Image: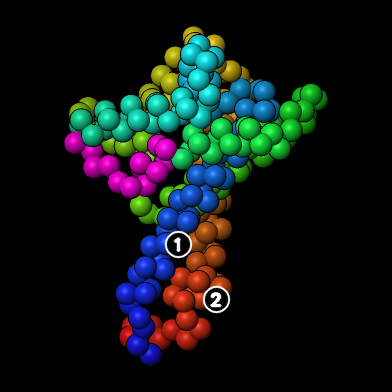
Amino acid sequence: MKLDLSGKKVRQTVLRYLAIFVGLFIVGNGIVLTIQANIGVNPWDVLHIGIANRTGLTIGTVIQAVGLLLVVVSYFFKVKIYIGTVLNMIFLGLFVDLVIAWAYVPNPELIWHRILLYVTGVIVFGFGVAVYISANLGAGPRDSLMLALTRVSRFRAGTIRTFMEVTAATAGFFLGGPLGIGTVIFALTVGFFMEIGFTIIKAFKRTRPYELIWNGTKHVTRGV
């Protein structure tokens, strides 16, 4: 069976962009869940909240501003900026502010409830990142900066990323950001939950519903 490749390409492009927006919205929810748990946040959000507390800006606006700065620095070091990078820079902060404004995330008092909320937030965050990355339209601003610093130094990407996380958390702490046990929990577990997210997405891509959505036809003859 001959496929309408032009229509298929448009449909798949739309689905990729949908994955980016859905993924970023999920990540935004994960961030707010960890903030509301009030036991510490991920290293970059320690910085974001610290700056927000000092400037009076919303957390989402700070996320956008920091993202813009990282993109500019990365571009200066000749790292190619993709559309996904720009969308991340703009919409992640927007979604965080929207979730905060809609106020549907609880603010529990009991410590065990806060821990449960935080772990849920890390799970949601990790899955959202997996959805976002699955669109394959470009890395986020922080990954772009990691690539830039890797290019101009003799250090490996993992070392650079660890340095970035520690620097962000330290700077955020001195600005009054909420560094806490949650920061450690996030650092130790987010990679694991991202891997689970990738596994779920990979499994879904092998299903018939995915094939119908992605190819837009009930009868696909492979290799035609």
Dot 2 alpha-carbon crowd within 10 angstroms: few under 14, some 14 to 19, many 20 or more:
few
- Examine the rendered structure and indicate whether residue 193 appears above or below residue 209: above
Q: Quadrant of the C terminus?
A: bottom left
> Whole-percent x and y of residue 45?
51, 26
- At 44% across and 75% down in the image, what residue appears? 215
The disc labelled 1 sits on which kind of residue? Leu
Relative depth, front residue between 159 and 175: 175
* Image coordinates for residue 207, horizontal then vertical, percent: 55, 72
Q: Amino acid at mark 2?
A: Arg
Residue 81 part of the magenta segment = yes
Is residue 123 located in the magenta-colored stretch of the structure? no
Q: Choose the circle earlier in sequence order: 1 or 2.
A: 1
Taken as a whole, is the magenta stretch helix, strand or loop? helix
In the picture as drawn, the residue positioned furthest to the right comes out as: 110
The answer to whether residue 89 is above or below residue 52 is below
Q: Which residue is mark 1?
A: 15
Q: Which residues are magenta?
A: 78-90
Image point (47%, 81%), residue name: 217
Secondary structure of the residue carrying numbered label 2: helix
The reply to whether residue 172 is visible in this rendering is no
What is the count of numbered marks? 2
Residue carrying label 2: 208
* Image quadrant in which the N terminus is located: bottom left
